[in-house]
Image (spheres, rainbow, N blue to C red):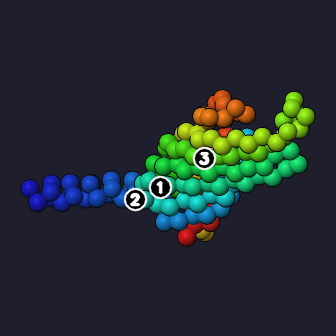
């Protein structure tokens, strides 16, 4: 009976060890993609537990005909694939504001502030050094936006320093 109990404890402990995550307490870097002109965003991740985290992204953009910002928050669950490879998914949302010139109104400046909901799914590789690379897909739906009120697909590469 003792042998069966010890084998069961070893099996449960080994299973828990194999499913353990290696997500950093904090990570900061860039998320480089294309979502409504916000090609690069400053990205911060904060671990909330052993397999979930919060990601905050801030994109700023300024051009001759437009300027604006976009702030997104995503809750992510993280699962280990093998070694340093993880995949993650989760819901989120955010706030954005654009200022742009309307060509049809003789270049009159117009401003739009709106909210959006988003989903996120991606894959990441965690190196032995404090570096992480990720590739993710983030569909977004905006509300209260006359400029772009449809479904937007954002694909981005993330480069983050883990600490």
Image depth: mark 1 or mark 3 in front? 3
> Residue 19's x, y, as percent?
39, 53
- How packed is label 1: few (under 14 Cα within 10 Å), some, or many (20 or more)? many
Image depth: mark 3 or mark 2 in front? 3
- How packed is label 3: few (under 14 Cα within 10 Å), some, or many (20 or more)? some
Q: Residue reaching furthest left?
A: 1
- Which residue lies under the disc numbered 2? 49
Which sits earlier in the primary sequence, circle 1 or circle 3?
A: 1
Residue 50 placement: quadrant: bottom left
Q: Is residue 95 visible?
A: yes
In whole angstroms, how far apart are the C-alphas of marks 1 and 3? 20 Å
- Which residue lies under the disc numbered 1? 53
Q: Can residue 138 be seen in this view?
A: no
Helix, strand or loop at label 2? It is loop
Please, is residue 121 above or below residue 162 in the view? Answer: above
Which sits earlier in the primary sequence, circle 3 or circle 2?
A: 2
Instruction: Tell me if label 2 and label 1 are in contact, CB under 8 Å.
Output: yes
- Which residue lies under the disc numbered 3? 95
> Residue 49's x, y, as percent?
40, 59
């Amino acid at each position: 009976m003792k042998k069966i109990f010890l084998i069961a404890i070893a099996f449960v402990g080994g299973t828990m060890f194999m499913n353990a995550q290696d997500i950093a307490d904090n990570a900061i870097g860039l998320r480089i993609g294309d979502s409504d002109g916000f090609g690069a965003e400053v990205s911060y991740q904060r671990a909330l537990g052993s397999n979930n985290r919060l990601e905050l992204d801030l994109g700023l953009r300024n051009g001759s005909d437009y300027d604006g910002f976009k702030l997104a928050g995503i809750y992510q669950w993280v699962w280990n694939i093998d070694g340093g490879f993880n995949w993650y998914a989760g819901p989120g949302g955010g706030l954005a504001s654009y200022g742009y010139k309307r060509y049809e109104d003789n270049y009159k400046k117009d401003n739009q502030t709106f909210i959006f909901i988003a989903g996120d799914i991606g894959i990441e590789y965690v190196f032995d050094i404090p570096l992480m690379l990720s590739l993710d897909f983030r569909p977004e739906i905006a509300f209260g936006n006359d400029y772009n009120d449809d479904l937007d697909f954002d694909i981005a590469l993330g480069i983050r320093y883990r600490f």
